[in-house]
Image: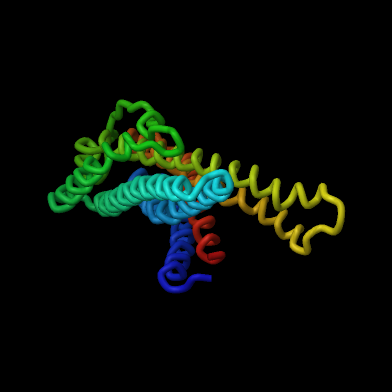
């Protein structure tokens, strides 16, 4: 198991899971939209904190698939062609890593906005200082968005997966600062949440293709052919089979993140308009808790 920052991160995720459950319980008793916004902001922070680990998992799968492609092609290529193919694969991985890094930066900026949103929800007066903060965060998001939108992951352009924009009607809130902020920036944030959702959907689909490619090649050579041949099975054949099924569970974390991103955006729209019920807020907390659980287990298993 890796130690250090990964272990500390796992402990922080455990704390956040407990905090989310407590926040939802408080919200269910008060039924106050201002409390819902605080709960929503906590969930948004948890979501953003989980995204980097999920993207790292997807990149590891991409590297494994790239290495598999190189191994399969190597016997068919001469020396010069082998080196050229290796350079091509390395270049593709470098491009993928750059895209994932931008998505991580985007998630960190979204996190900063949620932190500011939580403070605004607790404020009963105008807060020009926080308004400057949120404006700066949205400028950062706006700087990252065009690159992410035009990026291609697994043959899909992320921008093609972005959900259509919705027309928001901001409701009335006890916090003047929060209401003013939403009137200024809710539409822009909804677009950024839609982009984060699209990016994670593209990453999940690419990872699914990676795992399918790995299963097609490795399971054939390590599981099916040894079983079909005469003679004794390899001593670790059972473990190989178990590892094959475990490989598929790696996709679950990315799919959970994409689902949480969708619920996060839907919850934000409903909350801004004053129509967020406890069921949807509970679904958001459940989705975020699921990603945090996956990322914690990945950290403990590293």
Q: Residue at x 42, y 39 (%)?
A: 153
Is residue 109 visible in the rendered image? The answer is yes
Nearest to the observer: residue 44 or residue 236: 236
11 on left or right of 71: left
Q: Position of residue 1 (x, y in %)?
A: 53, 71
Count of numbered circles on the image: 0
> Which residue is most to the right?
231
Q: Position of residue 195 (x, y in %)?
A: 35, 37
Q: Quadrant of residue 150?
A: top left
Nearest to the observer: residue 13 or residue 32: 13
77 on left or right of 179: right
Is residue 30 visible in the rendered image? The answer is no
Q: Position of residue 86 (x, y in %)?
A: 45, 49
Nearest to the observer: residue 129 or residue 157: 157
Q: Residue at x 43, y 73 (%)?
A: 4
Nearest to the observer: residue 218 or residue 293: 218
136 on left or right of 197: left
Q: Position of residue 114 (x, y in %)?
A: 31, 50
> Which residue is most to the left?
128
The answer to whether residue 146 is above or below residue 103 is above
Q: Residue at x 59, y 42 (%)?
A: 213
The answer to whether residue 57 is above or below residue 194 is below
Q: Residue at x 22, y 35 (%)?
A: 183
223 on left or right of 79: right
Colouring mode (rainbow / by chain / secondary structure / one colour): rainbow
């Amino acid at each position: 198991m890796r130690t250090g920052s990964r272990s500390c991160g796992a402990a922080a995720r455990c704390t956040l899971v407990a905090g989310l459950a407590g926040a939802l319980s408080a919200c269910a008793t008060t039924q106050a939209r201002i409390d819902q916004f605080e709960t929503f902001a906590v969930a948004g922070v948890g979501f953003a904190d989980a995204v980097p680990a999920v993207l790292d998992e997807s990149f590891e799968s991409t590297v494994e698939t790239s290495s598999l492609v190189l191994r399969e092609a190597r016997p068919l290529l001469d020396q010069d062609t082998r080196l050229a193919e290796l350079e091509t694969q390395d270049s593709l991985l470098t491009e993928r890593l750059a895209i994932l890094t931008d998505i991580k930066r985007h998630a960190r900026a979204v996190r900063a906005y949620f932190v500011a949103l939580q403070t605004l929800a607790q404020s009963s007066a105008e807060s020009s200082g926080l308004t400057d903060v949120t404006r700066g965060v949205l400028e950062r998001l706006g700087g990252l968005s065009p690159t992410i939108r035009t990026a291609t992951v697994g043959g899909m352009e992320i921008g093609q997966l972005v959900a259509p924009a919705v027309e928001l009607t901001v409701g009335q809130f006890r916090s003047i600062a929060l209401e003013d902020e939403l009137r200024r920036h809710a539409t822009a944030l909804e677009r950024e949440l839609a982009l984060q959702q699209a990016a994670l959907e593209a990453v999940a689909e690419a990872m699914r293709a990676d795992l399918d490619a790995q299963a097609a090649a490795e399971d054939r050579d390590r599981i099916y052919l040894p079983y079909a041949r005469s003679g004794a099975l390899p001593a670790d054949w059972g473990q190989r089979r178990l590892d094959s099924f475990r490989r598929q569970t790696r996709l679950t974390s990315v799919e959970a993140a994409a689902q949480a991103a969708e619920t996060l955006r839907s919850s934000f729209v409903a909350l801004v308009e004053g129509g967020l019920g406890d069921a949807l807020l509970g679904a958001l907390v459940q989705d975020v808790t699921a990603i945090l659980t996956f990322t914690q287990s990945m950290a403990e298993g590293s």
